[in-house]
Every structure is written in C-alpha cells, then in structure tokens.
Image (spheres, rainbow, N blue to C red):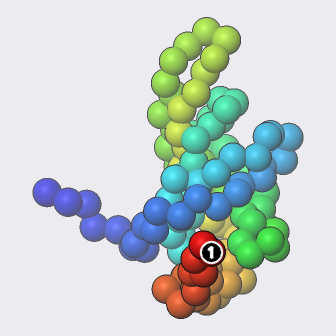
Amino acid sequence: MSELRAFPRHPHRLVVRLRGMLPVRTRDVSDGGFQADMLQPLHRGSTVRGSLTLDGEELPFEGEVVWIRVEGGGPTVRGRYAVRFTSGAEGFRQRFHTWRRRQGHRLVRWFT
C-alpha cells in the first residue's frame, strides 16, 4: 500500500548548505522539505538552518530533521536524512514551482 503524502516529491539534485556542514545534494525535493545524503550524523528532531540553491540563488530555510538512516560505521558514517521545512519555505515554494515549469521549456543546442 502506498503512503499518501501531503506534497509530491520531485527527484531534483539541488545544493543544500547547512550551518557548520559541507554542502550536499538533495535526492528529492517537495514543497514541504527534502531528502539528502549526509556526511555527518544528524539527530532526529534536530532543528537545522541552511539554504537551498536554485538557479544560482541561495534560498534560506529552517527545518526539523524528521528521520535519518545511517549506513556504515566507524570513521566513514554515511546515510540519508529528511528535513521538513518549518519556516522560510514560502519563498522557496514559489521559486521552486516557477523553476520546475521552466525545466520543460529548456532548449538543447547540439554542436557538431
């Protein structure tokens, strides 16, 4: 049985910058948040502040880590985390929808 979601996920690879961490890329993005790979452990329930880069512009947000999945152990801990936006998402939503509409209208030029 598939899980109903409040916001559909879109498989876009946007750059995420969280304070004090290296930038990472999202696995998917929705109006309500994003999922990304992690290089450093986060804790479920943690408040995070950062920005998502869209068309070269950094859009700030605040969010809450809603789940983590750790893969590996020892010195090379990797995994995934999901963040639900708690503030700053209104501006991102508008820009994200405009950006997604433009994605279908990009011209591809072939050089020979």
Instruction: Return the x and y of residue 7 as percentages of the image width and height.
Output: 43, 73
Tell whether 3 sits left or right of 49. Answer: left
96 versus 79 height, above or below? below
Q: Residue at x 78, y 57 (%)?
A: 50
- Count of numbered circles on the image: 1
7 versus 14 height, above or below? below
**Residue lying furthest front:** 112
Instruction: Return the x and y of residue 99 as percentages of the image width and height.
Output: 62, 83
Q: Disc 1 marks which amino acid?
A: Phe
**Would residue 82 be seen by someone viewing this image from the given angle?**
yes
Residue that numbered label 1 is attached to: 111
Q: Assess disc 1: are there few (<14), some (14-19) or many (≥20) residues with their C-alpha within 10 Å of its C-alpha.
A: few
**Residue lying furthest top:** 74
**Would residue 90 be seen by someone viewing this image from the given angle?**
no
Q: Quadrant of residue 86?
A: bottom right
**Residue lying furthest left:** 1
The local secondary structure at tag 1 comes to loop
